[in-house]
Image (tube, coloured by chain):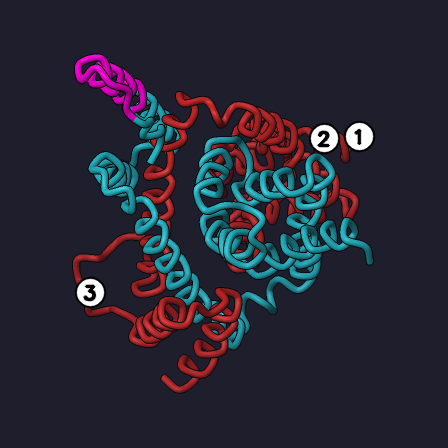
Chain colours: A red, B cyan
Amino acid sequence: MIYLELFWSFFQIGLFSIGGGYAAMPLIEQQAVDIHPWLTMGQFADIMAIAEMTPGPIAINSATFVGIRVAGFRGALAATFGCVAPSCVIVMTLAWLYYHFRTLTLVQGVLAGLRPAVVAMIASAGLSIVFMAFFGQRSLPADISGIDPAAVFIFAAGFFCLRKWKLNPIAVMAGSGLAGLILYSIV
Amino acid sequence: MNGKARKYWTLFWSTFELSACTFGGGFVIIPLMRQKFVDELHWIEEQEMLDLVAIAQSSPGAIAVNASILAGYRVAGFAGALLTVLGTVTPPLIIISLVSLCYQAVRDNAAVNRIMAGMLAGVGAVICDVVVTMTGGLLKGRRALPAVMLIAAFAAVRFFGIGVVAVILVCGAAGAADTVIRASHAKREETESGQSRPDKGGGS
């Protein structure tokens, strides 16, 4: 049954991808291109692009896209719920453990150690996104003359509004989209 | 609407809105979620949020889904977690279903691409803002260890390509070791000075 197959494939993807959307990509490729004849490599590349440019987690986006291609909207539902099912069980268990044991000194020590790691990882991901916006690639290029001035301007204006006036991030994102539409049309 | 129903609705709608507005995966939704649940709704504390993010990152699955499960569980238990999962997966379900119908047209549309390029720069600004705020919170205790760990973890992820899980394990172990060492240190000082001192507390 196709719905069960979709559910099970994306259940495995959800279970084995640790560390966010980019970690799920090779697993999706394996399940949907190699094991099952659901997608061609070209369609898989299209999914990468779609998942990048639409809101929402990459794994959920690809689950929906694959599901709808293979078995319509119900296929999309099966794949999406397969994808989140492992998270629901594992994370809720961890949440329960956290709220029961977080007052223990040793647990507090572990958690205190995790905090700098979390900030460091967000900083690294943020840097990748800034470079992506400025240069169209995830790391700093040797030659920075290809920098996109409109992106730098939008970034600087957005950062200023956030620091100075504590503007709502969603408002900043909407303003950035509008600024992009205007600035890139002029340039 | 009574208080409980309103809380459930706010939970669902908050995660729905966040999921519908975040481009680019888990690391983008975390800052927005922090802003919503910590600064705006005051449902989760600052330090607690960092702990939840660490759990979300080191668990399998999409970070955004994991983080919303944790936030939902914190605010309204099991039912809350189910609501926030639903809130997080519904927007992509709707949007991708629509996009898959007219993918080619959307991908080649110049206006859409310009808006996307602008939003990418905006997302960068949002993340940088959150990193500055979070770093300030970490360094408030004026201890050297968090600062050193922050730099080391950043270098490990950014320059040496070390996996997220490995970094989390090492930092957790370092934090535990630090607590044990400080606890035994405090005990020794106590017996040497011969008088009891107020407990300085565990984490900073």
Q: Is residue B39 left or right of residue A66?
A: left
Q: Which residues are magenta?
A: B179-197
Mark 2 secondary-structure assignment: helix
Residue sitting at x 64%, y 36% = A83
Distance (Cα) linking label 1 and label 3 = 53 Å
Q: Are marks 1 and 3 on the same chain?
A: yes
Q: Are marks 2 and 3 on the same chain?
A: yes
Q: Is residue B111 above or below residue B42?
A: below
N-terminal of the pair, mark 2 or mark 3, is: 2
Q: Is residue B168 above or below residue A50?
A: above
Q: Percent x, y for residue A186?
A: 40, 87
Residue ID for mark 2: A5
Tell me the quarter of the picture where residue A176 sits.
Answer: bottom left
Tell me the quarter of the picture where residue A142 sits.
Answer: bottom left
Q: Is residue B33 magenta?
A: no
Mark 3 secondary-structure assignment: helix
Q: Quadrant of the N terminus of chain A?
A: top right
Q: Are marks 2 and 1 in contact (CB under 8 Å)?
A: yes
Q: Which mark is residue A1?
A: 1
Residue ID for mark 3: A144
